[in-house]
Image (tube, helix red, strand yellow):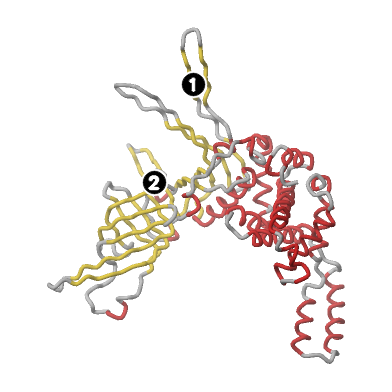
Amino acid sequence: MNKIEYKGVWWLPEKPEEQIPGTLKFTPDEGAILELAGSFKDISFKDIENMDKMLKSEIILGVSADGEKITLYKCFESDFEITVRPSFQKFPTSVFRAEFVFIGAHFQKPEDIKFKSISVHYSHLDEWVNISGFTFQYKSDTGEFLIKYKLPEPIQAKINKDCKISIDFKVTYPTRSIVQKEANIKQRTYIRIEHSIEKSLDEYLNIMRHIQNFLSLGVTEPVYPSKITGITEANKHTITDNPYISPVEIYYRLPEISRAPRTVYPHNMLFTFKDISDRFEMFLKNWFEKANTLEPVYDLYFGPLYNPRMYLRHQFLSLIQALEAYHRRNFEGKYLPDDDYGRVRKKLEEFIDGLRIDSSFKNALKNKLKYGNEYSLRKRLKEIFRQYKEITDNFITNKDVFINKVVEIRNYLTHYDKNSREIAVDKKQLYHITQQLKIVIVICLLSELGFNFKEIKNLLARNYKYIFNR
């Protein structure tokens, strides 16, 4: 996701003969911006009514000055201008923005954008995997320093019958020079997602997001894709009678990635690959299989992690919703079976209908009955603490007091209950409670991943973030 800039010619797939010079610029903050010295519009003034309408195009194709094929996807015109000279010559310029950039291939239609595999380098991935192909040997008596490198073998895991995820290692070897003053070998770790048949970009992006969250849980810091390449049949070539598919570079806007991530060392992470190396496939399968039911929990927990500038009260509310969603999906939480409650609800509605009160008040009471069979937040929290008592006892000593505070704060921030205002506006206490809620959710997620209670206690006990939030 580095900055890139390409000068070249650009055209619409349906009009390849109308090529316009322009410059493509991409930064993670701004995304892709194409500045054209011309326009895809008809500027003959025959259709003046549509002259000011901004164009939308699913695809814009281009070839850079050095011959690189480029596809821009999900494009829209953001600026258009015509300068008319005294000689009545018209000089149009236009600017397009694109959601995605593919360097190295031409896709004629959106449905052509499919990939057999996609490789992603994530921030902190090298440290999380922490597998090196380097060995060092120093002989003090001779002053000889020996560096050996062997490319590590890929690590594979199948998350379902159709999709395989691998940890790959790629290396750049040293160059030779007439005057050799240095030699550099650089290894980088990638996650490769591979399907049995080509899949759409959206399907890969969904898998990439789940892997990103999985890594963020382990690293305890936001993780972002920093380099993405894909393999597609649309880019197959023949070189000396041998088929060859050159990789396609994929870019899209990620404003957060421009802030250089601080280094997180393995000993500061919640868990690393080495902690789960013997069960890597099982953990990944669990994470993806449970995403079907726990995706709202993932989103509500990782939202504050990826948005550290979110207001503290919003972080608190997001985490409370995550715990409610977790309990609802894992324990359901209903007082009565649906059929039994249906009969109770009917009786209650009949009673409400017989009351001599305003009709709008009657409707309000009936609406409350829709959720009358669901557990309260207080009861849901008590069940979660009872389920994970063996672990939560190490972090929250008086659970009843803690749950009361959480419920009071939620009531104030949701309903602005004046009786709960004092505790809700105490920022120090709100911060401490919010950090403890994070620990509770982490315990739930680690358990869903496949860690047993003893392992979870050990993981939390060795990490300073959780030690200081007891």
Residue type, mark 1 in image: Lys
Is the residue marked by circle 2 packed among few (<14), some (14-19), or many (20+) residues within 10 Å? some
SS at badge 2: strand
Residue 114, position in %: x, y?
Answer: 47, 54
Residue 17, position in %: x, y?
Answer: 25, 62
Nearer the observer, disc 2 or disc 1? 1
Residue 72, position in %: x, y?
Answer: 38, 58
Residue furthest out toward the bottom? 356
Is the residue marked by circle 1 packed among few (<14), some (14-19), or many (20+) residues within 10 Å? few
Say which of 162 and 25 sits in front.
25
Residue at point 77% right, 42% down? 452
| Quadrant in the picture for residue 465 | top right
Looking at the image, residue 208 lies above or below residue 82: above
Say which of 358 and 109 sits in front.
358
Marks 2 & 1, CB-CB < 8 Å contact? no
Residue at point 78% right, 81% down? 366
Is residue 293 shown left or right of residue 209?
right
Residue at point 27% right, 53% down? 8
Cα separation, mark 2 vs mark 1, equals 35 Å
Residue 320, position in %: x, y?
Answer: 72, 60
Marking on residue 14 = none
Say which of 468 and 42 sits in front.
468
Residue type, mark 2 in image: Lys
SS at badge 1: strand
Which of the two labelled residues, at mark 2 and mark 1, occupies the earlier sequence position? 1
Is residue 334 shown left or right of residue 263?
right
Marking on residue 148 = 1
Residue hosting label 2:
236
